[in-house]
Image: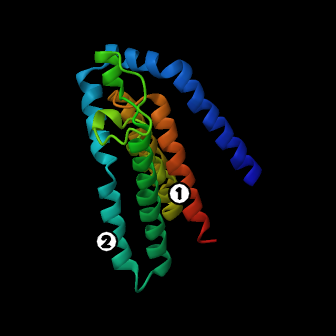
Amino acid sequence: MKQRSAQIIIIWLAAIVASMLWLDKPLALWIESTQTDFSRMLGHWLEEAGKAHWILGYCIVITGIAWRSRRDEAYNHLRLFGAVAASGIIANIIKVIACRPRPPLFIEQSITDWNVLGFQMDYMWNSFPSGHATTGLAIAVAGAAAYPRAKHAFWIVGIAIALGRIMLNVHYLSDVLTGSLIGVVVAEILITLKR
C-alpha cells in the first residue's frame, strides 16, 4: 500500500509541474474569457462553503456532544478538525513563503514572477497553494472516514470546493492540485493514527 501511495504522489507532483509549465496560464486566460455571472455566483458560493471555520466549528460542537457517550465519534471529529486545521496552517505558511501572484495579476498586469521568500501577506500574492483546495480535500478524506456512508457526498463537496477556485479564476490549476495534495496527505496521516 505504501508503494502505491508513493506512486500516486509522484504522479500528482508530475501533474503539478506539468500544469505550471503548460496549463496554468492558458487555462486562466480561457476561464477569464468564458466566465459568466452564473459561474461567478457558483464560485462565490463554493468559496464560502470552503471556508475552514464552518467545518472546524462543526467538529468542536460534535466532539463536545459526543465526548462522554460516543468517544469513537468524538475522535473521528477531532481527526477531521486536525486534518482541516493542520493542512490549512501548512498551506498558509507556504503561501507567505512562495508569494505567487494570482491569475488576475497575470491577466491584468502580466505579472507572473513569484516573489519567493517575499513573505507577503497580500491576498493577490498568496496564490500557491490554494487554501480552499487544501480544506476541501481534507474534508473529503477525513469526512469520508468519519462518515463512511456519506463518503461520496464528502468527496463531491471537497472536489467542488477545490474546482470553485479555478472557476473564480483566483488560483491556477497547479495551486489547486498542490493544495489538494496537502489536504489529502495530512488527512491520511491523521486517519492512520487511529489504527
Looking at the rendered structure, the kind of residue marked 1 is Ala
Q: Residue at x 41, y 55 (%)?
A: 89
Point out residue 193 in the picture as x, y percentages from the top left corner. Answer: 59, 69
Work out whether residue 74 or residue 115 is closer to the camera in this orientation and state it.
Answer: 115
Percent from the top left, x then y, of residue 160? 41, 39
Q: Decide if residue 1 is in sight here.
A: no
Residue at (66% x, 36% y) in the render = 11
Residue 73's tag is none
- The kind of secondary structure element at disc 2 is helix
Estimate the x, y position of residue 139 in percent, counting from the top left. 44, 54
Residue 15 shown left or right of residue 89 in the figure: right
Name which quarter of the figure residue 38 lies in.
top left
Q: Which residue is mark 1?
A: 187
What residue lies at 27% left-to-right and 20% top-to-bottom? 36
| Horizontal arrangement in the rendering, residue 106 relative to residue 188 (left or right) | left
Is 161 above or below relative to 138? above
The N terminus, quarter of image? bottom right
Residue 61 image label: 2
Question: Which label sits in the foreground, 2 or 1?
Answer: 1
Q: Amino acid at mark 2?
A: Val
Under circle 1, the secondary element is helix
Spatial CA span between label 2 and label 1: 20 Å
Q: Is residue 140 visible?
A: yes
Q: Earlier in the sequence, mark 2 or mark 1?
A: 2
x, y percent for residue 165: 37, 34
